[in-house]
Image: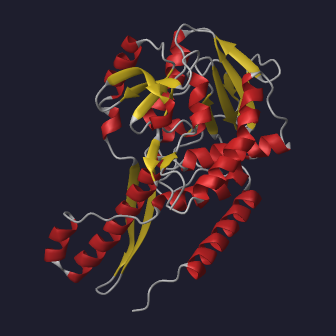
Amino acid sequence: MAAHKSHHYVPQFYMRLFSGTAAERVGVFIIAKERFIPKAPIKGQACKDYFYGTDGHAEETFGAIENATAPILKSIVGGALPAPGSPDYHALMLYLAVQHSRTLEAEAQLAEGSEHTMRAMLRTKFELEGNEEMLDWLELVRIKRNNAIGEAVMTGTIGAMLLTDLALLLVQNDSDLPFIASDAPVVVHNRLFEATRSVGTAGYANLGLQIFLPLGPRLLLQCYDPAAYAAVDAAAGVVRFDDRATARLLNDLQWEAAGKVILTSPTMDQAELHSAATRWRLQRGGPRMIHRQEIVSRTDTEVRVRQGVGPKPSDIALDLPFLAQTMPFPPPLGPYEVAPSRDLDRDAMVREAWEDMMDLADRMHPPPPR
């Protein structure tokens, strides 16, 4: 059995960025109950027993990544961004991808997308067979994905290679509204494709990608596609703002991505948290993933379909004063059209690596004999 049964999907060292003078304490807003705990023990937050299995291997790997990343984030908080292409830069990109993919929300997204896809395939099959009984049962059956978190982390780890062309920006918040984080603190967004309302436009490979990670109440790390955006008035990669509206807009990214809790400074204004919870109450209740299916051809014995599944498009219009969009908004995408990639060759390399990993997984864990 693993030495530690409580597995943190948000590292404790990261949550300490919000603790201030309250050692080992962090503000926690429980979204479902709309309750704020100003000084909750960090040790008990954003964790789940044996979330990554019982053998301890995943925990050891995450620990090694965190140990490599902690001094990098400390340097960033001190105002020094890693140079593009440097070992620290690549370590940071790996951390962002792994952190984005290792949370309860990442697992839930993958499991929900798999359920949508499988349910649609079975529905088409039963409709073709005229099996009304199974169609009725299908709506009552829960379809569960095994080891969704393992596949999510593998996807993020391999996908980290797609992030190594992004520019970095350190955002200094001089307003009277502090930054917040959540139990899914790494947020992906795509300002370029907001208006299209298309599924899956904030993938790691997509043109216009943006990534956000708060680094405490006053700092935030932003990664962005330099082909689509340019920093405004940046000094050594650092930008500043002092208006409350911009802070609230960036905090909304955390509200939209969060699973169960918002993480804050222990001194966070409770009224602001309750106000935000009210604004987001209805928007957070819907599906995480959107599934689309189109019948390509149909005969008496066969139906060919085309399916697509991806994260629900963001409801946030992210017009930031310190980041200019240098590329015009593209025309709307078709229902099954994907947003263009920043680098097709790198995209193909990652797809090949993914296929190799899936082949290896199949060989290591063959299906049971019939």
Judging from the image, the colouring scheme is secondary structure
Give whichever of 363, 57 is nearer the camera.
Answer: 57
> What residue is drawn where x is 23% and y is 75%?
127
Q: Is residue 340 at least partly visible in the picture?
A: no
> What residue is drawn where x is 78% and y is 46%?
90
> What residue is drawn where x is 69% and y is 62%?
350
Image quarter where the C terminus lies is bottom left
Q: Looking at the image, is 48 positioned above or below residue 363?
A: above
Give whichever of 218, 175 is nearer the camera.
Answer: 218
Could you tell me residue 133's position as x and y percent?
A: 13, 76
Q: Is residue 299 at least partly visible in the picture?
A: yes
Q: Looking at the image, is 287 positioned above or below residue 215?
A: below
> What residue is drawn where x is 49% and y is 22%?
264
Could you tell me residue 236's position as x and y percent?
A: 83, 21
Q: In which quarter of the image is residue 258?
A: top left
Could you tell me residue 221's position as x and y percent?
A: 67, 29
